[in-house]
Structures are given as C-alpha cells and as structure tokens.
Image (cartoon, rainbow, N blue to C red):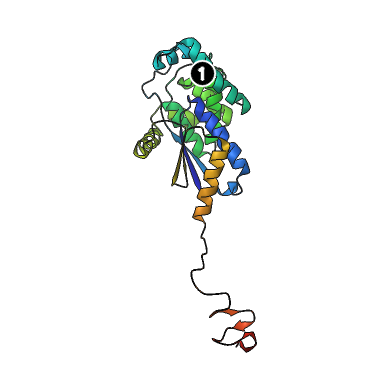
Amino acid sequence: MKVDIWSDVVCPWCFVGLANLDSAMARFTHADDVEVVLHSFQLEPNAPHRDDTPLVELLARKYGTTVEQMRANQQRLVDLGAERGIDFRFDDAIRANTFDAHRLIHLAASHGLGRAMKDRLGAAHFTEGKAIGDPEVLRAEAAAVGLPADEVDDLLTGDARADEVAADVEAARRLGVTGVPFFVIDGRYGVSGAQPAEVLLGALDRAWSEREPQLVTVAGADDDSACGPGGCAVPGAGAAERS
C-alpha cells in the first residue's frame, strides 16, 4: 500500500503532520508493507531565494493581524512541535524559495534518503535559521545526509529534477489540493491537514481492510453439495452415507 504526501519545506504543519504519520505507522500492523512517497508543493512559488524580513512580520502582514497575535498563534505550533521532538524557532526562520530544496529532496529520494533530506532541510529552516534557498546551504545539508557531492553540484547548477517538482505540483492541482500537508492513502483516501495520529491510523486501517479480499458466503450450508475431509455429501443422505 502507498501513502503519498504533498508538503512544503517551509510549512510547519507539514512537519507536525509527518510526525503524526510516523506515530500512526508505529502502531499500524502492516507498516512494513507501506511505501511512503514525498511530493513537492510550494506555498509561495514566487518567493525570493532569501528575504531577511522577520517572518512574524511577513505573516502578520499577510493575514492582516498584529505581530503579537501572530506570535501567540505560533506558540501553539511551538508547543505541538516540542511534543513531537521538533524545535520550531520562528524568530530565526528566513523566508526562502523552496524550488531547489524540493529538487534536492527528489535527488535524495533516488538514493533512499528523501525523508532524511526533508527532515534535515526542515531543521535547517525552522531551528537553525539557515536560508534554504541558498545553494551553498543546500550543498552543506545534502552532504550532511550523505548525498554524492558531484550529483548535488550538477543539480544545483542545472535544472535536473525540475520536471519532477512540476509534475508533483500539477498532480496536486488535479487533486484539488490547496493546502498542505495532504495525504493520499492507497490512491483512494485523501486526508487534509496535520490530522492527529489516531485519525491517520484509522485511515490506514480502513484502506488496508478494504484492499484485502473479503470472503462472503452468499448461498449454501457447510455440508450442502460440498466435499470435505470426511468425504462428499450425497443429496438426502446422512453423515454415514457420504461417498
């Protein structure tokens, strides 16, 4: 079974949602048979590579609220993150374009390191105050998870994996995804937002149970017109008259 996830590197709810999925998967009986696939989504595709304006001011302006109210809203995420081992430091976060970061995650996925790259970039952005639109920052973070330096250089100096990012964005558009995280379980069940682990576990259980063949007896009884270890039933005969 496959779980597809659309998310952005600068989306705090996406990392909360991924942590919730990890918790759900830890309790899911068939977790070893589940493939989790990360997909790109850009909340702000026209963002500059770097903008040093304090993030809280940018968000307050965007949502038409005060800096104080925005800080209060962010505190909820800080608390949720701490419960999941995520250290959100919004005062240090730097606005950045995530297109190259997504390309890097696709490269990492080809080496089986997609989630590691995603988490490393999340920590760089939200905890360490690094500008993840900066190619040198991306090179350093790629090296930290063990990606080949020559492949990273080729990617960052060209347009490799750009088509994969574009394909993810287009797939999200076709699905009607307008916010992330967005989960698609077994290609049939969509789950929007950073839902609690219990909700995700319930969706996993339902999808798995519905994909397994279900035997339903629609006619006949156990001994009617059937053969078993004791022989074959003869119409109108008792157990002693089995052939």
Front-lying residue, 49 or 235: 235
Task: Classify 138 as above or below 185.
Answer: above
Q: Label 1: state its secondary structure.
A: helix
Q: Is residue 25 shown to the viewer in this render? A: yes
Quarter of the picture containing the C terminus is bottom right
Which residue, given by chain and number where applicable, does mark 1 sit on?
73
Q: How many labels, in total?
A: 1
Image quadrant assignment for residue 165: top left
Looking at the picture, how far across and down is residue 207, in whole percent? Answer: 50, 49
Q: Residue at x 39, y 35 (%)?
A: 177
Task: Classify 25 as above or below 150.
Answer: below
Task: Classify 224 as above or below 131.
Answer: below
Looking at the picture, how far across and down is residue 130, in whole percent? Answer: 52, 18
Q: Amino acid at mark 1?
A: Asn
Looking at the picture, how far across and down is residue 125, in whole percent? Answer: 52, 21
Q: Answer left or right for 237 relative to 188.
A: right
Q: Is residue 154 shown to the viewer in this render? A: no
Looking at the picture, how far across and down is residue 98, in whole percent? Answer: 43, 25
Neighbour tally class for label 1: few under 14, some 14-19, many 20 plus, Cα within 10 Å: few
Q: Residue at x 53, y 32 (%)?
A: 17
Front-lying residue, 94 or 91: 91
